[in-house]
Image: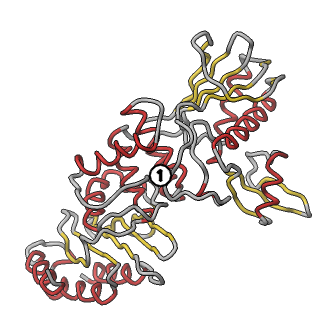
Amino acid sequence: MGVGLVWSLLSLTVLTDGSPWASELHSAALLGKQLTALAGPADAVLAASPEGKILAGVNIDLALVPASILKLLTTLAALEKMGPDFRFKTDFYLDPQNNLKIKGYGDPLLISEELKVIADHLAAILPTVHNLILDDFYFEQPVRIPGRGASAEPYDAPNGALCVNFNTVAFNRINGRWITDEPQTPLLPSVVPKIIASGLARGRITLAADSIEALEYTGELFRFFFHQAGMHVTGAIHRGRVDPEDTFLWSHQSGQALNQVVAELLEYSNNFTANQILLVMGAEFLGAPATVDKGLQVLRAFYRKELGIQTGRIVEASGISRDNRVTARAMLTVLQRYEPFHTLMRREGRQFYKTGHLKGIRTRAGFLTGADGALYRFVVIVNTPGRTTDSFMKVIEKRRLED
């Protein structure tokens, strides 16, 4: 079907739509012409009414690289299947040799503030322990995320069942001395060589090329907070498993429910958190150990069967892989289901949105609030290098405000 025919059919449809965008044939046709003029052959854009009727669209069935707007699909699946009140956990055991065992279940927000809460609680009942034994076997290792590189950039942080601070550290250099750039997190001596190797004077890097390296840092940070709370760790840090004879002490529930985790994920577009959710979701529904394949089975079933989308390809959860493909029409279906959760997205004026960025790729999807409070949908997927989503959004917002 040619572009002209597409616009003809859309115009006939929107005449009776009754929405601000579709008050006149001329308005819809003008919007369509403007968007068509902006779009390249590797770009897709659509605007839709609160009821989901497409008011204007270009290449809406072309499967393109979505970048981080794919996180809307991942988080929608998690919110619907696990529930917005779902909480991640971390369990603690004491073995017969007075070793404290910590079993992780993939909590993506096991951050310094949570570690302090944990340390204060356990120090009150355990004044001294021998070794710290870390059990990260809830995730099958190695965890290989398609598209994840081996750089020190935070977006390449490796996933694991027992990770702290997103497997990253924030630092600064003042008067020739390395210091933490987060008051709640100490700068442990073991991380300084990697900071120096990064060549940065200030920033955030991942300290772990793999899960074992990440686990070592997790143990060191736990030990720091235990000592600070008054618990003495007399031995070393090891990787190991919880055994049947171990005494269960406590299950720490994350301080934030899933909906809060999602809001933070969308705010900072955190790849690590998105794939942690994928892995945990796989284990929740298909059993431990968590694997990328199990997570993808759950996510793809949600995409194909529950959303009814038969186009595209999903290879991981964050959008970091260029092998992901979705259409603008598919993203519109995701947005339709996302409406109850739209306030979890970043907000700017009347817009609730998620963006995506890869080299040569720019994407944006979300909602525009109308004068009547209704939520209009938009999807912009730009796969033409050198282009941005800005020009498309200016046209969409201008037409909405004028109509």
> Which quadrant of the figure contains the C terminus?
bottom left
Secondary structure beneath dot 1 equals helix
Q: Between 399 and 9, which is closer to the camera in this rendering?
A: 9
In the displayed structure, 254 sits above or below 200; it is: above
Q: Position of residue 225 (x, y in %)?
A: 76, 34
In the displayed structure, 362 sits above or below 181; it is: below
Q: Residue at x 77, y 19 (%)?
A: 129
Q: Amino acid at mark 1?
A: Ala
Q: Between 321 and 172, which is closer to the camera in this rendering?
A: 321
Q: In terms of image quadrants, where is residue 114?
A: top right
From the viewer's perspective, tell me whether residue 174 is left or right of residue 237.
Answer: right
Q: Residue at x 76, y 62 (%)?
A: 198
Q: Residue at x 78, y 55 (%)?
A: 194
Residue of label 1: 263
Q: Residue at x 66, y 22 (%)?
A: 101
Q: Position of residue 151 (x, y in %)?
A: 65, 60
> Which quadrant of the figure contains the N terminus?
bottom left
Q: Position of residue 361 (x, y in %)?
A: 45, 74
Q: Between 293 and 107, which is closer to the camera in this rendering?
A: 293
Q: In terms of image quadrants, where is residue 130?
A: top right
From the viewer's perspective, tell me whether residue 249 is left or right of residue 223.
Answer: left
